[in-house]
Amino acid sequence: MQRRKFLQAAGLSATALVAQQLLAKESKKSTKRSDAIKPLTICTWNFHRATAKSWEVISNGGTALDAVEQGVMVEESDLSNQTVGKGGRPDRDGEVTLDACIMDAEGNCGSVVYLQNIAHPINVARKVMEETPHVMLAGKGAEQFAYEMGFKKDNLLTPQSKAEWETWKITSQYKPIINIENHDTIGMLAIDKNGDLSGACTTSGMAYKMAGRVGDSPIIGAGLFVDNEIGAATATGVGEEVVKSVGSFLIVELMRQGFSPQKACEEAVGRIVKKNPEYANFQVGFIALNKAGETGAFCIQPGFSYSYYDHFGQENRPATSYI
Ligand code: SD4
């Protein structure tokens, strides 16, 4: 039978047939873990309890936005994580000041910087996004807004962080220890069952920073960026370097130009390294996720990894590094 006649007999147009073949190939592909499968969620470092929470939300049909918000809240609540939320290390004056931002699939975003006395800055960032005409609220204004939204005042300085700060004051030497002292910020990305992307990032910033210092984590484009057409990226490490390179926005733009998430993270780290000869003395790490559900990560120093969760389960994925 001629091909054309065969197609007519089968009641299929040539286009429909090609689409069917592609779909068959796609579903065959997705039985292997190495292939991209939605939904999925990732976050900086091995915060497996955070991705477990995020996964619980998206695997039950929740939105990527709810997933990343609830995922990062796990770390904000963890008093043993001294770089995020309550329990975070203070600035050099002994004040715990928090930074966080969130971005949804429509390109909406909300951010809080230098927020004190509120245990879950990510919730306040979401309220800024949803309840105000603004993107960012800072300091006393952000705190006042949080109380208006019903958040309760909390003492964020735990006895452990206070005791360590008092010890630090003896020498007052400001020298962040790579991968340990200052690097447990959580940046989380997710793609939900509808294929929509969102991201969240939250931190207490660099330990013993100058009063008033704000890093990359609450800065849209630096610590986090999401473009639902392309992908999303988030950062951890020395925020000054991430801000200078607008790292997360750069990664998303590189993915727009055809870079894989992995190659885009490598290029973003490469630009920081190229500009700063001191790169051997600090850490920056990026993770990225594209619209197809492919992920990537890259950092300057060895030791960075990211937590990954999809329907095959959870993995801690070590990131490759420049050094
Ligand atoms: C900051 N990027 O405030 C944050 C710190 C960080 O893991 O990532 N800690 O610069």
Image (cartoon, rainbow, N blue to C red):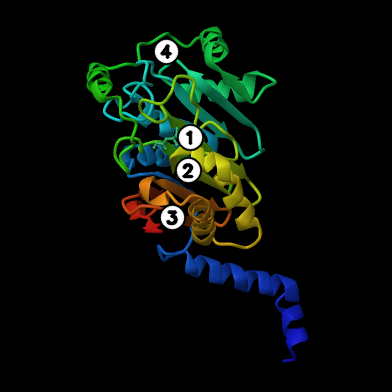
Residue drawn at 52 percent across, 61 percent down: 263
Task: For the residues labelled 4 and 1, say whether their Cβ atoms are less than 8 Å apart.
Answer: no
Mark 2 belongs to which amino acid? Ala
Marks 4/1: CA–CA distance: 18 Å
Q: Could you classify mark 3 by the number of other residues whose Cα lies within 10 Å: few (under 14), some (14-19), or many (20 or more)?
A: many
Nearer the observer: mark 2 or 1; the answer is 2
* The label number, if any, that marks residue 117 in the structure image: 4
Q: Where is residue 190 in the image (x, y as percent from the top left)?
A: 50, 44
In the rendered structure, the answer to whether residue 286 lies left or right of residue 197 reads left
Mark 1 belongs to which amino acid? Cys
Mark 4 belongs to which amino acid? Asn
User: Does the numbered disc 2 mark a residue whose Cβ is under 8 Å from ligand 1?
Assistant: yes
Q: Mark 3 points at which residue?
A: 298
Q: Where is residue 292 in the image (x, y as percent from the top left)?
A: 56, 57
Q: Mark 1 points at which residue?
A: 201
* The label number, if any, that marks residue 235 in the structure image: 2
